Amino acid sequence: MVGRVRASAGVQDRSSRPRRSAHATGAAVVAAIVELRRSRKLVAWQIALGLDVPRSTVVRILRRVGLHRLALLEPPPVFQRYEFERPGQLVHIDIKKLSKFETQGHRIDGVRHNANAGLGFDSAYRGNGDVIRHHAKHARDFTNKRAYRNRPLTDGDRETNRCKSSVRSYMEHAFGIIKGRFCFQKVRYRGIAKNLNRLHILAALTNLIICKKRLLRLAAA
């Protein structure tokens, strides 16, 4: 007791575990247990059977290294959370509908008239807000602000909404002409050169239609 006081340990409790143990599990066996647990995800009795070690020893070692549960072998999934300063702000999400099939497709059996009607669809959701912010850091959100019962829009918000609507209507007018006058229902293509050239020609013709009156006035003058 005097020695502990002189060593500044005081009368605090300390572990009664012996410093040396003749029957302690060897470091090689501990490493083998951990390796089997991490690589093959074996349970305690399988590891004990393979290494000829008592099951209680395997369980004690796994608990000591923090691998006593299979869920601890893989890190928990990180969920992307979207938090905004005010309620009502929107998240850009793309939705893709995938048809359900009960028979194999025509790419396997070569038959194109297999009926899979009435099976419904599955929807895949993907948030593209992070992708947009990564590729266009200075992009601005042109969605209108919403009014709520306890938080009506101010005059500045209404003016901002009118400005955004006018910009969107001007930009969407070209797509309306492409789809309405030229009956071009799909206006987005990737990777096909001829479709891209066709879309460029349609965009050029759309610009001529939009500037039609202005060009006629210039020609008459």
Image (cartoon, rainbow, N blue to C red):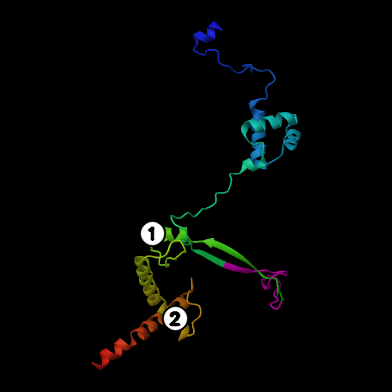
Q: Which quarter of the figure has residue 84?
A: bottom left
Q: Amino acid at mark 2?
A: Gly
Say which label, 1 or 2, has the lower sequence index.
1
- Crowd tier of the residue under label 1, counting other residues whose Cα lies within 10 Å: few below 14, some 14–19, many 20 or above: few
Return the x and y of residue 144 as percentages of the image width and height.
Answer: 42, 68
Write the residue at 64% across / 41% down: 39
Q: Which quarter of the figure has residue 162?
A: bottom left
Magenta highlight on residue 169: no
The residue tagged 1 is 137
Quick check: 57 left or right of 187?
Answer: right
Report, in whole angstroms, how far the alpha carbon at label 1 lies from the one at label 2.
Answer: 28 Å
Disc number placed over residue 5 in the picture, else none: none
Q: Is residue 40 above or below residue 8?
A: below
Return the x and y of residue 123 as percentages of the image width and height.
Answer: 61, 65
Residue at the far bottom: name it.
Answer: 220
The reply to whether residue 126 is visible in this rendering is yes
Along the line of sight, the residue nearer the viewer: 110 or 184: 184
Residue at the far left: name it.
Answer: 221
Are the residues flagged by discs 1 and 2 in contact, CB closer than 8 Å? Answer: no
Quick check: 57 left or right of 216?
Answer: right
The residue tagged 2 is 176
Write the residue at 65% across / 28% down: 28
Q: Label 2's element?
A: helix
The reply to whether residue 32 is visible in this rendering is no
Q: Is residue 52 above or below residue 215?
A: above
In the picture, the quarter occupied by the C terminus is bottom left
In the image, the segment drawn in magenta is: 96-113
Write the residue at 42% across / 59% down: 133
Return the x and y of residue 13 as percentages of the image width and height.
Answer: 58, 17
Q: Label 1's element?
A: loop
